DNA sequence: TGACTATGTGTCATAGACTGACACAATGAC
DNA sequence: GTCATTGTGTCAGTCTATGACACATAGTCA
């Protein structure tokens, strides 16, 4: 059952096994979702596919939906956290002369493609989400999770408090914009080179709309 | 069990009974949520409180969360639909010289207070939602439901397609703004006369932030 | 290497949201 | 009053999720 873990770097055998099992679950789940649809795939199906009990599944993922919002194989356990703060730091670090829209756009152009490119994971998740209308709503939640952080970054640029209205509203607006971009990108076949164009287009529209 | 239905206008006895049961369920549920919290109130608790089986509960409400997003006693069954389209029509009908922000603000000043004032229902729902962090996320969904409509109204004003970016982003931004307004309003004690002030304040901030 | 501890796993039992099927009761129409 | 329509309770069952316990595996220390 355990496959060659030797080529994976990292801590103890346990940690490597855990990471391996996690990716096995995630991969099996996304495949099953793809074939049978999210609703018609039970947690037991997933567990069976990996050869674990469904009880064990819940020791790896808090819920079935967590599979869709998981940030990668968590090779090093908080890699994505680092990535996230990097992104926020990048937003804050953009030249003060730039508007928030310009700053965010620049950061997205640099990093959004990378995010969806590194492995196919995020794209596969995105596709499942887009396929099931009920999930699109929940997906907003996943973005929503990051909104406070985004609002914080905006607040820093604006010299305001993160709970103030402007940062939060801007975060909501741009979160929606990113969502639309990803939607269209996936619908267009998810070609990596399309992403920058879509970002440009979207942000131009937003600027025009908000101005 | 059935209480004096005679003073309620409306169609057949069956319809009146149904409407009555519906409000009984809704009222009992919100009371229980208030006392024991949303999570610790089971559907069976609610059903017991009304004197129906939990199976019957699900014949009135699609889900437990539906209780929080239900639009009133549905005396006349699609009253809220009418209200909703009225609101959208009002947005479209505002003078063309107004910006979208101004138009929406004017409509909200006219109608938002009314919406939360007519009966205590929406405020009670709002309080439950705000009390339980997990629900705040779902609440976004409920607003989200109406976003396409809002986007449509905006699109009409902008002379754009409802699926275009600008209307959707604007809808997201203003939905968030409304949400923030309601949050603060509830936190402030939900005094009816505070609402217009909060609306003014919020929209001023948004305009300043977006400009 | 062998014992000892920590951690992971399966099994079992259970709660809680929801759904389908069926029998029975109440309503509305004639 | 008869008869079709519709509402309700009961029962059984699915699926997500969690707690308890026993057993197995990995990490540690002598």
Image: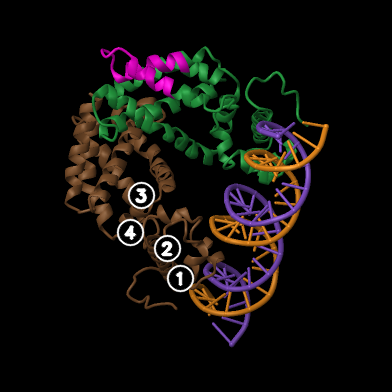
Chain colours: A green, B brown, C orange, D purple
Q: Is residue C20 above or below residue A12?
A: below
Q: Mark number for residue B121? A: 4
Q: CA distance from mark 1 to mark 2?
A: 8 Å
Q: Of label 3 and label 2, which has the lower sequence position?
A: 2
Element type at mark 1: helix
Q: CA distance from mark 3 to mark 4?
A: 14 Å
Element type at mark 2: helix
Residue under disc 1 on the same chain as residue under disc 2: yes
- Report in which chain the residue with disc 2 lies: B
Q: Of label 1 and label 4, which has the lower sequence position?
A: 1
Q: Of label 1 and label 2, which has the lower sequence position?
A: 2
**Residue at the image position 26 percent from the left and 12 percent from the top:** A97
Label 4 crowding class (10 Å Cα cut-off): few <14, some 14-19, many 20+?
A: some
Q: Is residue A108 above or below residue B38?
A: above
Q: Nearer the viewer, mark 1 or mark 4?
A: 1
Circles 1 and 2: CB distance less than 8 Å?
Answer: yes
Q: What residue is pinned by disc 3?
A: B130
Nearest the camera: B159 or A111?
A111
Element type at mark 4: helix
Residue B22 in the image, given as x and y percentages of width and height = 43, 65
The overriding secondary structure of the stretch rendered in magenta is helix
């Amino acid at each position: 059952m355990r496959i060659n873990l030797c080529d994976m770097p990292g801590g103890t055998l346990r940690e490597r096994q855990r990471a391996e099992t996690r990716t096995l679950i995630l991969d099996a789940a996304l495949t099953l979702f793809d074939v049978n649809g999210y609703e018609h795939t039970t947690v037991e199906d997933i567990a069976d596919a990996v050869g674990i009990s469904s009880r064990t599944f819940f020791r790896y993922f808090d819920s079935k939906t967590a599979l869709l919002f998981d940030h990668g194989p968590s090779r090093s356990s908080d890699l994505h956290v680092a990535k996230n703060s990097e992104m926020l730091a990048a937003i804050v670090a953009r030249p003060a002369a730039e508007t928030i829209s310009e700053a965010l756009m620049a950061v997205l152009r640099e990093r959004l493609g990378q995010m969806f490119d590194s492995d196919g994971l995020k794209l596969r998740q995105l596709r499942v989400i887009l396929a099931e209308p009920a999930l699109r709503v929940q997906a907003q939640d996943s973005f929503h999770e990051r909104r406070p952080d985004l609002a914080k970054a905006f607040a820093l640029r604006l010299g305001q408090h993160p709970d103030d209205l402007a940062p939060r509203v801007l975060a909501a607006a741009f979160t929606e914009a990113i969502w639309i971009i990803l939607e269209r990108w996936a619908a267009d076949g998810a070609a990596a080179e399309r992403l920058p164009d879509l970002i440009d287009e979207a942000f131009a529209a937003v600027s025009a709309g908000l101005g």
